[in-house]
Amino acid sequence: MSQQGADDWWQKLYEDPDAGPAPDPGDTLDNRFRSAAGAGPGQDSVPPAPPAVAPGVPGQPAPPAVAPGVPGQPAPPAAPPSAPGDQAASAASALRSDPGRPGGPSAADGGSAAGYRSPLPASGQPTGERFGPAPGGAQPWHGAQPRDPRTGGATGYVLGGVDVPPARRAQAPRPEDRTQEVPAPATDVAAPQQRPEVRHLGDRAPTYAAEPGPLPPADPAALDALVPDTVLEGARYGGCTLRAASLRGDSARYRGEARRDFLLTARFGTGDHALVLVALAGGDRAAPGAAEAAADLCRTVAAAVGRSQGRLADDIRAGRRDALRSGLQRLTDRGYGRLRARAAELGLAEEEYTAGLRGLLLPVDPECRTRVSFGAGAGGLFRLRSGQWQDLESAGTPAPARPAAPPEADTAETAGEPGSAFRFRASVARPGDTLLVCSGGLAEPMREEAALQAELAARWSEPEPPGLAAFLADTQLRLKGYADDRTAAAVWEA
């Protein structure tokens, strides 16, 4: 179509229908739309818009549009280039602005009252220049979407024979536009180990319950004398692992009495010359001062060992067994002498203020594997070697489950506990050995119950020593008829 034809077409489009001749029969809506769509992309300028007069007002004819390029008239501003889809939408908008053409807005079919908004001129813009730059694309949003006129309906329109792009409906955000919650990195959590089970051995359950009952009575003027139900200790030096525990017996727990056994662990010195001492003592539960006597005896002997730490360490490394035996015997006798003096002060008999004692000396030096045990009174010393228990303090002809003590064991009479003998032993540990020193509450069932020996041998023959909680569960394996306090210290040799 020529330039003059295009100008006539635009002029007829915006003329008042009553001011001119009848429209050309061939001038249809489809032909006009095709003409506008074909002429739009290749034109250098855009025809001016008619004046902003409300359509349908009587006596207000629209002035004829002036074609661009006519002398004396300023050319309208050129529209910026737009996308092909926007050009088709602009042409359709121009058709709808004519109130006299079919398909134009009216009050009957919605018009501006139904939400349709005519492109009015901006403030200060000359009349007739109604076309401005194409609006930019709206930002996507995820709320309620405006109605698209191409979908038809009361305020929409439908164009036949024209390829209209489909209406864009609200869509879910693209995966790349979504804000995804990044899961926390998975951590390797080790499966919790089964907690040690406190149970009993033998066919019959013990008389008392396994867990503590009432608390012992407390004196507000002597709160430092309170004794906890259980004490747990552990250490490791080189290939030597120590576990120690002292717990209240079932009978004392049931009656709400304090624990009478006492456990003390200490390290004296520094470096390879240091010594680790384990001292434990247990008194007769029928004696009124047994708990105080056990604590007093352990503290007295430990203080003497600490003061003689240098000489004891040298004797152990040099293998001077005679010097060790005589020196430790004097320390033990001195401790029992202190108990007798204290019993006299309290007006108690000697046998009522006493306790059985066991001590164990462990050199920190990894090159020295000598282990020294000493003590007097009730208690025991056992060794687990190659899966079999040996009672290292048994006297006379041993039973199969209680082998005789090796030749390096020494015994001597002492003036300590009445009717008891001082016990001393210095031996070289072998890899895989487990040495157990304990009070009378555990020594008795170890000597008399084969089931306890077998159970502890199976538990303590593992490649790794038990942890503190597992060791505590092992030491309180219950048997009917054995309800006294139990105190034990075990050493595993790598």
Image (tube, rainbow, N blue to C red):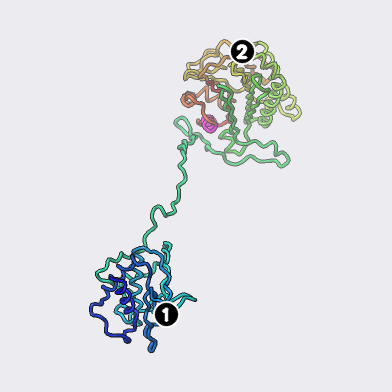
Of residue 455 and residue 61, the one placed in the foreground of this image is 61
**Which of the 4 quarters of the picture holds residue 328?**
top right
Residue placed at 69% from the left, 36% from the top?
Answer: 225
Specify which label sits upstream in the sequence, 2 or 1.
1
Residue 469 within the segment the image draws in magenta: yes
- Picture coordinates of residue 62, whole percent (x, y): 38, 83
Q: CA distance from mark 2 to mark 1?
A: 126 Å
Mark number, residue 52: 1
Residue at disc 2, secondary structure: strand
Magenta-colored span: 468-476
Mark number, residue 410: 2
- The amino acid marked with disc number 2 is Asp
**Which of the 4 quarters of the picture holds residue 335?**
top right
Residue placed at 66% from the left, 10% from the top?
Answer: 322
- The amino acid marked with disc number 1 is Ala
Characterize the local packing of mark 2: few (<14), some (14-19) or many (20 or more) Cα atoms within 10 angstroms: some
Vertical relation: 256 (above or below) 106: above
